């Protein structure tokens, strides 16, 4: 069990050090991504 607890501690330490920003994270970047996606999804209709 001793090596198992050491392994778990190293994994939790590595996870805590990871600060990669994901696209689905809350904030301005996410809002900009959603706005861009919505703008592309609803193309403007051309009138005759």
Image (cartoon, rainbow, N blue to C red):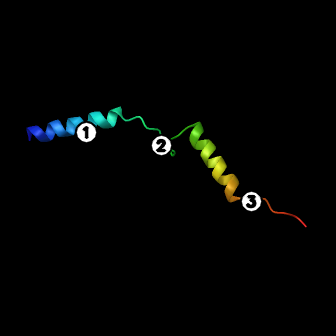
Which residue is tagged 2? 22
Q: Residue at image x 11%, y 39%?
A: 3
Point out the tag, 3 or 1, that comes first from the N-terminus. Answer: 1
Q: Quadrant of residue 4?
A: top left
Assess disc 1: are there few (<14), some (14-19) or many (≥20) residues with their C-alpha within 10 Å of its C-alpha: few
Which residue is tagged 3? 43
Q: Residue at image x 16%, y 36%?
A: 6
Label 2 element class: loop
Q: Is residue 29 above or below residue 34?
A: above
Q: Position of residue 29 (x, y in %)?
A: 58, 39
Q: Is residue 36 above or below residue 9?
A: below
Q: Is residue 27 above or below residue 38?
A: above
In space, the residues marked 1 and 2 are separated at their CA atoms by: 20 Å
In space, the residues marked 3 and 2 are separated at their CA atoms by: 27 Å
Q: Are marks 3 and 1 in contact (CB under 8 Å)?
A: no
Q: Are marks 3 and 2 in contact (CB under 8 Å)?
A: no
In space, the residues marked 3 and 1 are separated at their CA atoms by: 46 Å
Assess disc 3: are there few (<14), some (14-19) or many (≥20) residues with their C-alpha within 10 Å of its C-alpha: few
Q: Residue at image x 20%, y 39%?
A: 8
Point out the tag, 1 or 2, that comes first from the N-terminus. Answer: 1
Q: Position of residue 35 (x, y in %)?
A: 66, 47
Which residue is tagged 1? 11
Label 3 element class: loop
């Amino acid at each position: 069990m001793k090596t198992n607890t050491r392994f778990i501690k190293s994994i939790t330490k590595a996870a805590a050090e990871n600060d990669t920003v994901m696209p689905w994270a809350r904030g301005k970047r996410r809002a900009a991504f959603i706005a861009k996606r919505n703008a592309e999804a609803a193309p403007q209709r051309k009138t005759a």
